[in-house]
Amino acid sequence: MDQDQIIEGFLISVGQLIPNTRIRVLDPGVDLPTGAGPSGFSCDDRNARLWFPWREGESPLAFAVERDEVGLTDHERLLLELVPQALGDLAGGTLSLTGLSLRFSGKIGFGDLLVARFLDPTDRRTLNHRISLFSALQDLSFRFYEDKRCSSGFYFTEDVAGFRARVGATNYLFYPFDEPLSFHFGMFEAPASFRYVDGRNSYYVVDADLRLHGIVRLRNPDSYSLVSRLRNQHLKGLVVGMPGNPWVAFVGLREEVYLVVNPDLQLKWSRNHWLLRDRGLIFRVLDRFGLVRDLQELFVSLLFALSEGGIGASILIPDDPGRMPQAIGKIDHTVIGDHLRQMIQRTNIVDLNATNSLLGILGSDGLTTISRDGVILSCGDIIDISEAALLQSQGGGRSQAGIAASFFGLSIKISQNGPLSFYFQGKLLLQY
């Protein structure tokens, strides 16, 4: 692997993993700390620098990863700190990927390796095992059976005995096999393997040596709403307070795989790249703009529900409830539409969520304005987008409306294809 390939792989993979960062190639003779060794990592709240050797006798490769507006989270910094080791392994050929049943390009191999390291930074012995598990799910995500997308999942633990001792106190039931079975990449070739263990309410229990010990099933799957599932609340009993560095991996609704480390931290594989989805980043943005902390968990869950459900929306949290964008129209001018808006306005999002009506309201066309204490101030607004036009901004009508609304506070645009975009004063703060 030559230098240009390593640089290209780094820029693409890390750019996907850590969203909305600026990545620069550094001059190791100028930009690194005095006395820096052949590899290393340094960071502050907003920026990180990392460097690593790539060939004996050559200067190290060095990069800066920067995010000016909202900085880097603890999990993002941890992931970046592992980059020199992962890239050094690939560049030096010290890690063999021949045990896998897939052929990896350099870029995809690096992303998979980095994610596997992130799941357990101290255990290199079983890196291939971790990669094999989510690689099998990646392959499954492209398959259909009887016109339905195939899905399944794994619950990984290094301490099966500890898991078995504690699982009875969770919202899951464990059904052990008579004896452990060996994982193999082709295990999902038989339809029963994914139809009976669907990755929604049931998962294979697997250890670090790729032995399958049984199936763990959710006790009362109907008690979890779409919103609670998309905030990973149904998985909380498996990953919070359980021994053995546990995580859950499963196929998503599209060609995607999710790794859930805890309810607020997950990694998403889509379009052959990994993305770190640290909800702490969104909490940081909402806290900065004054959303009441008791509402932040619900609000973030709603954003993810809209995003994962492919439901487009435009939301504004105004700096001043008395100063909002000028509405030049409503999405519905009928009498019933006017009455429904009057009923919705001045209602708190907590009350609307309790009746399972909030997603439908937020996903309706037009701008929904919500106060910092969670009260819906207006909805279904078609607003003047001339401010966005003056900036010569790119994008469709929802993007233009999101930018125009951002001159009145924090504007959030949810695209139908998934991304969350946060704007303020006409500037993109974060795309997630």
Image (cartoon, rainbow, N blue to C red):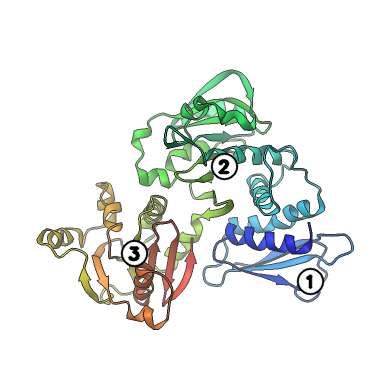
Drawn side of residue 289 relative to residue 159, left or right: left
The amino acid type, in three-letter code, at marker 3 is: Ser
Mark positioned earlier in the residue sequence (1 or 2)? 1
Q: Is residue 401 visible?
A: yes
User: Image quadrant for the N terminus?
Assistant: bottom right
Could you tell me which secondary element the residue under label 2 belongs to?
helix
In the picture as drawn, the residue positioned furthest to the right comes out as 57
Q: Position of residue 36 (x, y in %)?
A: 81, 67
Q: Is residue 323 above or below residue 284?
A: below
- Give the Cα separation between the discs numbered 3 and 2: 32 Å
Query: Residue at 34% across / 34% down in the picture?
Result: 222
Q: Is residue 287 visible?
A: no
In the picture as drawn, the residue positioned furthest to the left comes out as 335
Determine the image quadrant of residue 229. Answer: top left
The residue carrying mark 2 is 138
3 vs 2, front mark: 2
- Give the Cα separation between the discs numbered 3 and 1: 44 Å
Determine the image quadrant of residue 34. Answer: bottom right
Mark positioned earlier in the residue sequence (3 or 1)? 1
Query: Residue at 83% across / 69% down in the picture?
Result: 35
What label does residue 314 carry, if any? 3
The amino acid type, in three-letter code, at marker 2 is: Gln
Could you tell me which secondary element the residue under label 1 belongs to?
loop
Mark positioned earlier in the residue sequence (3 or 2)? 2
Query: Residue at 72% across / 63% down in the picture?
Result: 7
What label does residue 414 carry, if any? none
In the picture as drawn, the residue positioned furthest to the bottom comes out as 390
